[in-house]
Amino acid sequence: MTTDPLPAQNIIGRAGSLLGETMVTAVLGHKRRGKTLLASKLCLEYFLGGGKLYHMGNLSFGEKIDDIGMLADQNASALLNCLLYLDEAKTILSSRNSNSAFQKLIGNNMMQAGHQGLSIIWTSQFQTGISTDLLDQCDYAIVVDPRSGRQPWLHKDKYNASTGRLKKANLCAGFDKRNPFYDEHAGPGRLLACAESNEKRTILYKTVTQRSHPSGPGITRHKTLHCAQRFYGLSDTTFKIDALAPMLMNTDQFRARQEAETIVKFGELLKALNVRGMSEITPAEIQGYMQGSFDPPIYLDIRQIRSYLKSIGVRKVVQREDRWNLDAWSKA
């Protein structure tokens, strides 16, 4: 992953937002320097713009992923036109487990992310140990400077008694109602008002384009996020990502999950047919109705259809005939 800038003449701006169209963004930084805070701010901007956001449970907005198998779901509608936020991505996509079925299926989703409108923001202290499937798809690396930090509010200029250096007042627009940027720092909605915080948080960072970026790697911009304490309420820093679930996920579990979802859709189709007046049906007729009824398509052979009919409690009209009674089943 590229984190060093090119020579100055190659450092240029780029139109559009930081995420752009279906961007994969890595946010890297040492502990307690603000990488999660910065990432949650980026997620909020996407969310407030009307985008669908998924996360592992550590954000105060968006939708929590309760079933981690969703990340590997090969159904194109599972992660369609959305932003996926993975805090401490190594707990889920570690290079040590890169040969697992779970990670291979996630990798396949990432390679086709642009086609389904999937953007990803992930954080990590270091890029080492991250699955190459994730690293190879990155458009941006955001690197938080170790000098980022917090300091108490200083209302007036004063000299430091021990060093003799002058400390300048650092109050922001949130302390002056006449300032045109007052509302931005006063904390509308769930954002924390600067004047209600006992400290000022500043995050220094740079954005570096990667090989997957349309403009090529190495284009660097240095930026500063002032008053980052406004975004403290967006994420839960004590939340612990469950690393056990992805480690235990295997092919059999995916197959069982897919079969359970198929049975539900199968039953819904039969109910719809019964509502339309069909009281009896054959497996061959069901097979015909299944064509074009599902996205993605579901194909079941006659043997599987008979098995599914039995599993949801549909019985034959006459035991020796292959006609199944939808009326009796729907009334049961």
Image: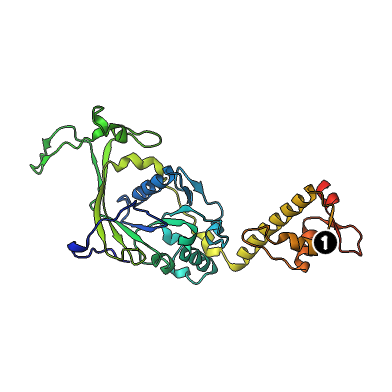
Image position, residue 229 (x, y; %)? 31, 41
Between 57 and 39, the one lying in front of the other is 39
Which residue bears the numbered disc 1? Answer: 282
Q: Quadrant of the N terminus?
A: bottom left
Per the image, label 1 sits on a secondary structure element best described as loop
Q: In this view, does 98 lie above or below 180?
A: below
Image position, residue 250 (x, y; %)? 58, 66
> Seen in the image, is 143 located left or right of residue 138?
left
Point out the residue furthest to the top here.
178
Image position, residue 134 (x, y; %)? 42, 64
Residue found 60% across the figure and 68% down from its top: 251
Residue 317 picture quarter: bottom right
Q: Label 1 sits on what residue type?
A: Thr
Q: Residues within 10 Å of mark 1 (few under 14, many from 20)?
A: some
Residue 237 visible, this angle:
no
Between 51 and 309, the one lying in front of the other is 51
